[in-house]
Amino acid sequence: MAVLNRSAESLQNQQEAISELNRKLLQAQRMEAVGQLTGGLAHDFNNLLTVILGSAELLAERLEHDPDLLQLAETTRDAAERGGELTRSLLAFARRQPLEPRPVDVGQEIQRMELLLRRTLGERVECRFDLTPRLPPALVDPAQLEAALMNLVLNARDAMPEGGRMTLETGFAQIDDDYAARHEEVVAGEYLVVAVTDTGSGMTSEVLAQAFEPFFTTKEFGRGSGLGLSMVYGFVKQSNGHVKIYSEPGHGTTVKLYLPRAAAAGVPRPMNPGRPARLRGGTESVLVVEDDEMVRTHVVGELTLLGYRVLAARNGVTAMEILRSEVLIDVLFTDVVMPGGISGPQLAEAALLLRPGLRVLYTSGYTENAVVHHGRLDPGVVLLSKPYRRQELAEKLRYVLRPEG
């Protein structure tokens, strides 16, 4: 009888193991399908948004004397920016958003955002900050960390419509081998912890099980896209971190982000230090390589307005003809993904052989794996992600043209 019981128990364990493997396989296939779909949509959609956003900006500048038309232009611009945020959220969930990680003092980052977070929560919600001093830096993309924190604070606010308390804490944690073995995609090691706790309605076990699913939301129609937590999940996972939710109905919710600790050395410095107070152009020569005619025409116009001398090519072959000529070129501004057999990185490699010292600025609505590996930009790569505003275009160009570049 004991032998039969052991056999039955062994069979049950095998069945559970097979079931778990099937679940992981389905999840991996689903993530791959979402990633491929999102990537294809992002490339074309962000090209369109780049033109819409830039055109709306130009219209807004020229319609300052007409309040009614100015409002229409500003509404168009805001809608384009929201479209870009939607695409970025989908890419973040699918772990296809290119990250620029660097050492970040998480406490300082939160302090910098404090006023914005308090305004977001509103007067009904008490806001507490419990920040552990002198923590080591985390290795994360600061812009994506800011977006993740904003999403968590918005969720906390929405969980407390009648008011309550939100607490934002930081700390340090060591994840051991036992914990890592019991959780998917978790590596043992040292982590910086950011915890956002609310005193809201909490989640049932059924809601908790789906909380990170894209487009899943408990809010009424039109009140949320269901992409906030999925974006947070994708960002943390792509950063080699861990995220955990603790929640019970009627007892609020805590979301903990475990962010990897930055190594003492060998970490890339920030790509874009500081923001200038005004729009700054230049007089240098820029070669724009873009296969989408509408985007190419738009970018040439933007750069011309910024004072640059501009040449344009629709693919890598045409660009190489220009590069082989005697014309002066200071910057190669090229799309990453292009048809015709020559990608942006391949064009840049060939261009640098012809013109050593040429500055290169990449742009893309979706990079595939051309300049991004393991979720991070390759060393030395400067990328302007579509859609972008004229201010961002101007800043990136001045960055790659800096004397020490």
Image (cartoon, grey):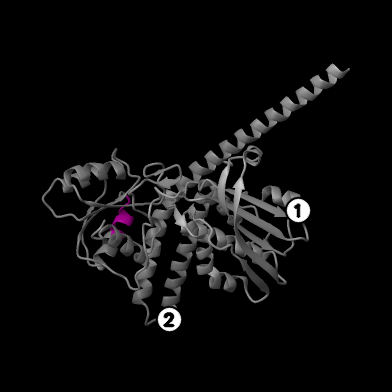
Task: Name which residue lies at 53% across and 39% down.
Answer: 32
Q: Which amino acid does label 2 sit on?
A: Pro
Q: Which amino acid does label 1 sit on?
A: Thr
Where does the magenta region start and end?
292-299
- Is 374 situated left or right of 118 in this image? left
Query: In the rendered view, would you say 295 is above or below 72?
Result: above
The residue singled out by tag 2 in the image is 67
Query: In the rendered view, would you say 8 is above or below 357?
Result: above
**Distance Cα–Cα, label 1 vs label 2:** 48 Å
Labels 1 and 2: the sequence-earlier one: 2
Res. 204 mark: 1
| Residue 178, image x, y percentages | 65, 38
- Is 224 contained in the magenta span? no
Task: Name which residue lies at 58% across and 61% down.
Answer: 151
Task: Determine crowd level at label 2: few under 14, some 14-19, many 20+ residues with C-alpha closer than 10 A.
Answer: few
Nearest the eye: 33 or 177:
177
Query: For the residues carrying marks 1 and 2, which lies nearer the camera in this image?
Result: 1
| Residue 193, image x, y percentages | 59, 55
Nearest the eye: 188 or 245:
188
